[in-house]
Amino acid sequence: MRITQIMRHSALLLALTVIPQQLVSQPAKEHATRTMVVLLGTGTPVPDPDRSGPATAIVIGDSAYLVDFGPGVVRRAQAAVLDRGVTALEPGNLKVAFVTHLHSDHTAGYSDLIFTGWTSGRSTPLEVYGPTGLNSMTEHILQAYRIDIETRTNPEGNQRAIADGWKVNAHEIKPGVIYKDAKVTVTAFATRHAMESYGYRFDTPDRSIVISGDTAPTEETIKACNGCDVLVHEAQMLELYEKMPERLHSFVTKYHTTTEQLGALATKARPKLLIVYHTIGFRPGIVPPKFLSSMNGVAASRSTAEVLQEEIASRYSGPFVIGRDLDVY
Ligand SMILES: [Zn+2]
Ligand SMILES: [Zn+2]
């Protein structure tokens, strides 16, 4: 091939392989002016080194809003600053959070958020919104850390200059608009899980974003999205579900969403982008965690992302991605 032919050939190949912009995770500087969805943790209760506990950040300019604070949340936020350039996620700048429900995988990072945020420079109380029980959880965490708080705020304490940063204003919510500031309106909607639970819709100047939390498929989620820009929704692999012992089937059926159900839900909800999260991770060739006895000690042959990609693509024709920690959309 002559050089001009090669160039034409390369240009054609490039044109054929162009991926829609919205399906590509972007460094923050690429779209610093628009609302970003930053996946801080896409995992489950499984202590997966590749997937931190559930946590998602909505970032609008220099303001950050968290949904859920699973284990690892603050270190993932710092990684988003250092590795992805999302400066609004500086730990001391984490001031507002919403929790979908009080399962430990979504809340085990609560004390980290309170205290690491404070020691990183937050000088005002943390504002947290969530279901009934949040007040009690908050009070007990603060009580548990009483000695730390007293030591850091006494006349010789190293945090005495920002002595209010450990405080938390917890708000127990009901469905409806639960938060509003100059940049965002947040609406809570009831979801269906093992306890009182909510999904959240964020309306910002340029985007509408819905986050499901843990839930079975619900009409409320479809209504909350209704053509939204981004729907972040949980999904359980059918392949894993089919291998689970019978006793776990009813839990998944009642309280979670299979890929098959997610395909049907997203078809009705019509998001411009579906991000799949809250997924159990497998690395090919490695035996899954012990408690997943359903896998019978068999090493997975494919990664979670491959299985989810295939299961959803065969059931849903809209744009979707399998979320990974620190992806930015
Ligand atoms: Zn969960
Ligand atoms: Zn849960």
Image (cartoon, grey):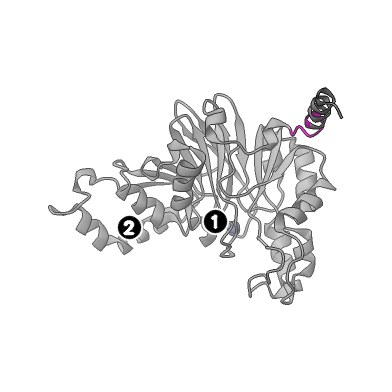
| Magenta part of the chain | 14-19
Assign a secondary structure to mark 1.
Answer: loop
Q: How many labels does the image show?
A: 2
Check mark 1 vs ligand 1: CB closer than 8 Å? yes or no: no
Which quadrant, please, contains the C terminus? top right
Residue at the spot x=30%, y=41% of the render? 124
Q: Where is residue 170 in the image (x, y as percent from the top left)?
A: 40, 47
> What number is the disc on residue 225?
none
Q: Position of residue 194 (x, y in %)?
A: 61, 60
Q: What residue type is labelled 2?
A: Leu
Closer to us: mark 2 or mark 1?
Answer: 1
Residue designated by label 2: 142
Q: Can residue 89 be seen in this view?
A: yes
Residue at the spot x=38%, y=40% of the render? 93
Q: Position of residue 280 (x, y in %)?
A: 66, 60
The quadrant of the picture showing ligand 1 is bottom right
> What number is the disc on residue 52?
1
Answer above or below: position of 62 versus 83: above
Q: Do the residues labelled 2 and 1 touch (CB within 8 Å)?
A: no
Q: Residues within 10 Å of mark 2 (few under 14, many from 20)?
A: some
Assign a secondary structure to mark 2.
Answer: helix
115 and 214: which one is in front? 115
Answer above or below: position of 81 versus 20: below
Q: What residue type is labelled 1?
A: Ser
Q: Where is residue 76 in the image (x, y as percent from the top left)?
A: 49, 50
Locate residue 43 relative to residue 164 in the image: left or right.
Answer: right
Q: Can residue 167 be seen in this view?
A: no
Locate residue 101 relative to residue 171 in the image: left or right.
Answer: right
